[in-house]
Image (cartoon, rainbow, N blue to C red):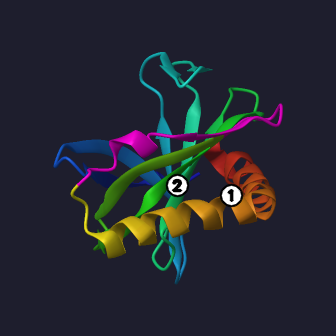
Amino acid sequence: MTTPERIVEVKTSLDGRVQEFACDVTAREVDHVVIRYRMVKDHDLHGVSLHAGELTFGYFWFDRPYNLYHWVRHDGSTAAWYFNIGSVTRFDGAVLEWRDDAIDILATPDGRVRVLDEDELPNDLELGRRQSILGARDRVLRELGSLIHDAEMATAKHFKDGGA
């Protein structure tokens, strides 16, 4: 197996906070990139327990107003699907920057779906931007079944091809 290509994911929140994550690239396509991040410590994210060593496959489309983190257990089963409303602002091959527009959608294998952090949208957010963010939220909720199906299929391939 070849050594995975490394990339830095840079997330900028609406409040200007910046976070960086060192990830591996598992696929580069014309319209998206897939990255893999291995949890370095245990986390509880909105009631989903993730453990050190488990994987996140991040799907970042260049033409969609959201991305998807597919959280995967050690055995390859799904812990959850976590959609971030936001968009890629720069991808140069070594750095993937994206803007996090606060609203998230968490779906779990037991069928629960929760919209998170709507209260984090600033009151003074420009109306057009607010409508765009809420429209992206609605799009993810409308297309949730097919988005999850596609992620399951793609992640199974990436996991099999050396994701573990």
Disc 1 to disc 2: CB gap under 8 Å: no
Label 1 vs label 2, nearer the camera: 1
What range of the chain is rendered magenta? 107-123
Residue 32 lies, in percent from the top left, at 52, 73
Circle 1 packing at 10 Å, graded few (<14), some (14-19), many (20+), is some
Residue at image location 34% in from the left, 75% down from the top = 128
Residue at image location 35% in from the left, 54% down from the top = 100
Residue at image location 54% in from the left, 24% down from the top = 53
Amino acid residing under circle 1: Leu
Query: 164 and 156: which one is in front?
Result: 156
Give me the disc on residue 2. Answer: 2
Whether residue 113 appears in magenta in the rendering, the answer is yes
Residue 34 lies, in percent from the top left, at 53, 60
Q: Secondary structure at mark 2?
A: loop
User: Looking at the rendering, which quadrant does residue 76 occupy?
Assistant: top right
Earlier-in-chain disc, 1 versus 2: 2
Query: 100 and 77: which one is in front?
Result: 100
CA distance separating discs 1 and 2? 37 Å
Whether residue 111 appears in magenta in the rendering, the answer is yes
Amino acid residing under circle 2: Thr
Q: Quadrant of the C terminus?
A: top right
**Residue receiving disc 1:** 141
In this rendering, position of residue 24 left or right of residue 157: left
Q: Is residue 77 above or below residue 30?
A: above
Q: Is residue 157 visible?
A: yes
Q: Is residue 48 above or below residue 18?
A: above
